[in-house]
Amino acid sequence: MDLSVKLLGLDFDNPLGPAAGPLVEGLENMQFFNKNSCGYNVAKTISVEGAIVPKPCIAGTSNTIYNCELWSELHSDVWINEILPTIHKEKKKPLVISAGYKEEDFRYLIPKLDPFADMFEISTHYVSEDLLPGIVKSIRENTNKPVFMKLSPHIDDFLGFVKTVIDAGATGIVAINSLGPSAAIDLKNRSVLLAEEVWISGPSIKPVALHRVYKIREAFPDIPIIGVGGIGKAEDILEFILAGADLVQMLSSALIRGRDLYDKIITKLPTALEEYGFSSIEEIRKIRKETIFKPKEKIENNPPSFNDNCTLCMICVKICPAGALEKIDDKIVVDKEKCIRCGLCQSRCPVDAIYGVLT
Ligand SMILES: Cc1cc2nc3c(=O)[nH]c(=O)nc-3n(C[C@H](O)[C@H](O)[C@H](O)COP(=O)(O)O)c2cc1C
């Protein structure tokens, strides 16, 4: 099964890379991703000075990471003189260098990072939107490499963000950064967990990330998009690519479950492709225009129908918000007067026994 992706003249063995964060901070971490099966490597966001991060700075639950990390804690000199030359020498795959934040930082950093980068990814997390054109210009004047601007989900007018940065000379978009600000409450200790400004990521933000990728792809059919936010399994990668991404990244699920998750997911990609009837990753990129972006056929206002898969597990009966489902003899029966045609039963059926409402 072909997992490869061709993008901007670069060859990627598969579409998954790490997302900027603690797993790509420093030499040993970068070497890990140079050697594992990820299709490309990414460096933690480098700014001129190392960040001073309030500690503790990361907490996790089974589907969410809370963090108040900033950019790399290492000074840019360490990246430029030690880490990046070593990675470049040992290089096995394309390298995306993440950088931030101000025009003057980029005028200093980009020429020094340029020899090591195949693409740049620019964090805009702490940047006011009116500064974006100047920032992109300061980067463009110092590199011919592809420049991806990273969208933070707290930006309301995200299509306006994309238009602004593309008009100013950016190549593509990374969507999305962590969501927030948010809060985690430590009930046992009756306190707020971590610092005041906390951002969330991991599977709980996947629907927001998919929304931004889908909407950006719909409005900008031809720009390269890297999708990130909540990926934790092979099927998630297929969803992001169908929604409009060309490449994808993952961080939080690996923080929650361990960094061997990258290899595990990539190993499972061929089976996932096969299960959903795709022959390659490139095929999904090609067919999305005629599938997910095709105007939707009008869904009729149908009540649910049941097929033979039904095991009478009763989940649909329990959850129907209208109380319209009932087990009579050995069948689930719909009260068509009561049924509000919402679709919840179909989406929650564990054995695909319900059809006709959503699809
Ligand atoms: C602990 C932590 C640190 C992060 N640091 C950065 C960073 O330095 N630069 C950046 O652009 N994004 C940073 N991010 C955001 C991630 O790169 C990513 O966009 C976000 O977490 C969503 O992906 P995920 O759900 O797979 O983690 C960080 C996220 C976390 C959880």
Image: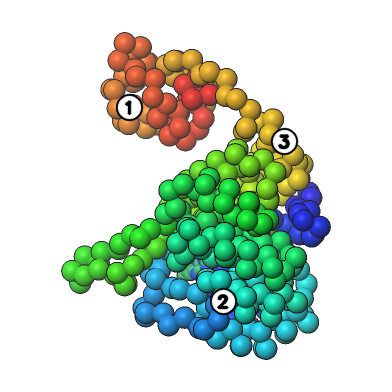
Identify which residue is drawn at 74% across, 39% down.
286
- Camera-side mark, 2 or 3: 2
Q: Position of residue 351 (x, y in %)?
A: 50, 32
Q: Pointer 2: what residue?
A: 105
User: Is 212 placed above or below 37 here?
Assistant: above
Dot 2: few (<14), some (14–19), or many (≥20) neighbours within 10 Å? some
**Farthest top residue in view:** 337
Give the secondary structure at mark 3.
helix
Query: Does mark 3 have its CB less than 8 Å from ligand 1?
Result: no
User: Is 331 placed above or below 113 here?
Assistant: above
Q: Is residue 267 left or right of residue 249?
A: right
Q: Position of residue 156 (x, y in %)?
A: 43, 48
Q: Pointer 1: what residue?
A: 320
Q: Pointer 3: what residue?
A: 287
Identify which residue is drawn at 60% across, 39% down.
219
Identify which residue is drawn at 76% across, 59% down.
12
| The label number, if any, that marks residue 231 in the structure image | none
Q: Is residue 53 left or right of residue 193?
A: right
Using the image as rendered, state which of residue 236 and residue 333 is in the foreground: 236
Identify which residue is drawn at 42% across, 26% down.
343
